[in-house]
Image (cartoon, rainbow, N blue to C red):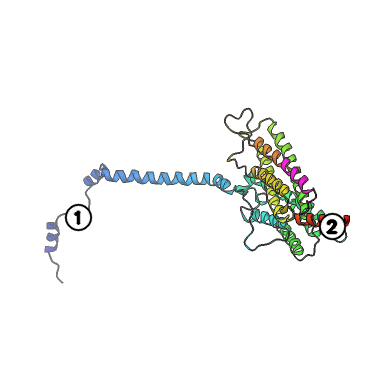
Amino acid sequence: MAFDSRLHAAYLEEGPDLFEVPEEHLRELDDAEPHPIMHFFQRLWRRIILLFKLSLLFALIGAYPVSVMLSHKIDDSDIAFANGQKWAFPESGIAITKIARELEGKGWAADKPNWHPQSRLTAMPAWQEATADGLSEFTRMVAAAVPDENGEPDADLTAASRLLKGLPGEDMRPRLTAAAEALNRFDSRASRSLITMPDRRTLAADEVRMFAGWAEADQDDLSTQIYQESTGWPASKQDIRVFYAAKARAHISLQMLKAARLADRDSLKDPEALAAYDKAEAAWTRAARIRPLIVSNQKGDGAIMANHLASLGFFLRDAQRTSLELAETLEKPLAPAEDEVAQLETQVADAAH
């Protein structure tokens, strides 16, 4: 095809290329400023990014303390058996339920690694350790009251008592699981009448005397801490440990006392024993249900915060007194029923004739 000479003229007529920006225009763009609306959205976006970064930083910093607070959960509610669940020895059911609560709840604090939030707690480890030790001592006492044919303490209860007593550096979960299994075996044998159970009234008296001993020992520990030189505000770690250890034993005493009362059928016909049970149960309830938001061991008149150690010690003193009164009442021989009295009078009259 022949060259069209008009092509160059057509290009000249169209003017400059639209995609080519002259140098003077480029200098004008350098001096140009964005629209105020764009300035607003730029500042808004920068603030959103800054707020997000700060929120992320605070979340990372506060996650651990929040986890520590959420890990602290002490369950001091009453133990209620499921419908249809029956125990030949109710105290074994109480002990098994207590073990399950601690293991299946927040877990055993002493078994956690050092980095775990629960390893920073003070109250829960003291509560759990005192719970295990209290159940161990209680189980050992019952084992001696239920000897085998050779006069030795019951093997299952003895094993449970040994397993409940923790060893330094050893995980408690397997020990507590095995202890619960031993307690369940004992109750199964008792339900099949393979064990000669002691008189429930006599055993209840032995139990409440043990609880009174716990109350006395805990009062001494609390008094020692009250008169110690203050090392923390509002309370030192040792104050918290002693408080929750005493509270844990009070909770065991209350739950075992309720179980013993239900199993003590003979005392249902004894108004004096029932009244003594009521007083002891009320006293232990006050000691077991004290629930301060923050444990305080303030010296002086307590104008700002109460002395919770002193309050718990007062409740335990009342629990000790009522427990000893209950034990003395249960150790008294039961008064004969009215029909037995009438029958005895008839026999005496017949003998006189």
Give the x, y percent position of residue 330: 77, 48
- Closer-to-camera residue (104/153): 153
Q: Relative to the observer, which residue lies in front, 20 or 246? A: 246
Check disc 2 and give the amino acid type.
Answer: Gln
In the image, 346 versus 242, the foreground residue is: 346
Residue 327 covered by magenta stretch: yes
* Residue 168 pos. (x, y %): 74, 48
At horizontal 34% and vertical 45% (from top left) the residue drawn is: 44
Residue under the image location 75 percent in, 63 percent down? 185
Q: Residue furthest bottom?
A: 1
Task: Please state which of the two labelled residues, at mark 1 or mark 2, is closer to the viewer.
Answer: 2
Q: Which residues are magenta?
A: 321-334
Horizontal side of 344 relative to 100 (left or right) equals: right
Could you tell me what secondary structure mostly forms the magenta stretch? helix
User: Mark 1 is on which residue type?
Assistant: Leu
Q: Which mark, residue 189? A: none
Horizontal side of 58 relative to 105 (left or right) equals left
What residue is shown with label 1?
Answer: 18
Q: Quadrant of the N terminus?
A: bottom left
Q: Does residue 170 appear in this view?
A: no
In the picture, residue 81 is in which quadrant? bottom right
User: Could you say where residue 117 lies in the image, as x and y percent from the top left?
Assistant: 60, 47
Residue tagged 2: 347
Q: Residues within 10 Å of mark 1 (few under 14, many from 20)?
A: few
